[in-house]
Amino acid sequence: MLAVLTGVFFFQTYAVRNARGFYIFRIVFLTVTLVFLGWYANAQLSVVNLMALFGSLVSGFSWQAFLLDPLTFILWFAVAAALLFWGRGAYCGWLCPFGALQELTNQIARKLRIPQWTLPWGLHERLWPVKYMIFLGLFGVSLMSVEQAEHLAEIEPFKTAIILKFIRAWPFVAYAVALLVAGLFVERFYCRYLCPLGAALAIPARMRMFDWLKRYHECGNPCQTCAIQCPVQAIHRTGEINPNECINCLHCQVLYQSETVCPVVIKKMKSRARLAASPGGAPIHQPAAKV
């Protein structure tokens, strides 16, 4: 899965060329993430892992605790490498089982014509910092008591929805279900506004070495297509992509090459068509003269 995802990111121009094919690929990949990584292997990363890592660094680092679950260790190593190249989206958008569960249930909701809510930009922008506040709060508590921080980290529904597969006391189940219900109307509601793990990964993601997502000069001014269609509203009205919120779903790259949606591509196609139709634009084959 890591090899396939790396290939998609490196060759994204070719991967997203067929919009329908890429959509099917993404749905299949997220399904494998949920079923195999999540429900089968229980490889769901958590902010608790980060707090345990910090505590280990303070009290004396040991590899033994982190090698107890090899798959989780491999995932953390891959996430650390991905942060340098692509930011947090490599994990949050593709390899997080609960994130996959949210997106898959939202896709089902769309098929059932459940209305989708787009929060006003002002409100959406003010809700972004909530997850950072939650992370900083948990981190501060962990400095005094790791046990108390782990208890408060139940704000993550991962243990209930992924590890225990909803077989738990009803308050925990009700909380996880409520987040999923909210995600039926606002795609990835939890990821956008409440996830402390996403906030923790977004902070070092600023150090990424490359900007892989292509943009036109017209993006944002005047074109707002990508900003409107971004599933997590990570694109500003001015056209810039917020790396702290982007989940690297590559939907904007699908639109970037779309011959039916992107105004820039459509304009270029029309210009080429006019040039080809002009007298000097393309050779005109005359019928052979009769003898």
Image (cartoon, helix red, strand yellow):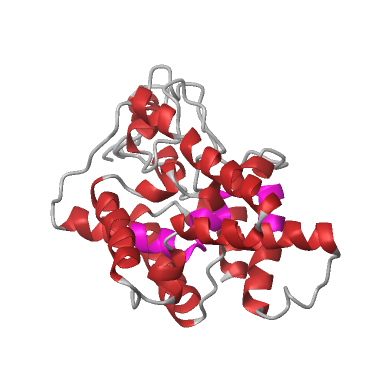
Give the quarter of the figure containing the C terminus: top left
Residue 185 vs residue 21, the one in the foreground: 185
Q: Position of residue 55 (x, y in %)?
A: 75, 59
Residue drawn at (51%, 77%) of the image:
42
Q: Which residues are magenta?
A: 78-102
Give the quarter of the figure containing the N terminus: bottom right
Whether residue 87 is visible to the viewer of this picture, yes or no, is no
Residue drawn at (42%, 28%) of the image:
125
Residue 72 vs residue 3, the one in the foreground: 72
| Image-based side of 35 in relation to 10, left or right | left
Q: Position of residue 124 (x, y in %)?
A: 37, 31
Question: Secondary structure of the magenta portion, mostly?
Answer: helix
- Which residue lies most toward the left here? 113
Residue drawn at (21%, 43%) of the image:
116
Eyeballing the image, is 248 above or below 215? below
Residue 60 located within the stretch drawn in magenta = no
Residue drawn at (54%, 37%) of the image:
214
| Image-based side of 97 in relation to 169, left or right | right
Residue 97 located within the stretch drawn in magenta = yes
- Which residue lies most toward the top here? 221
Eyeballing the image, is 233 above or below 27? above
Whether residue 216 is visible to the viewer of this picture, yes or no, is yes
Q: Position of residue 148 (x, y in %)?
A: 58, 58
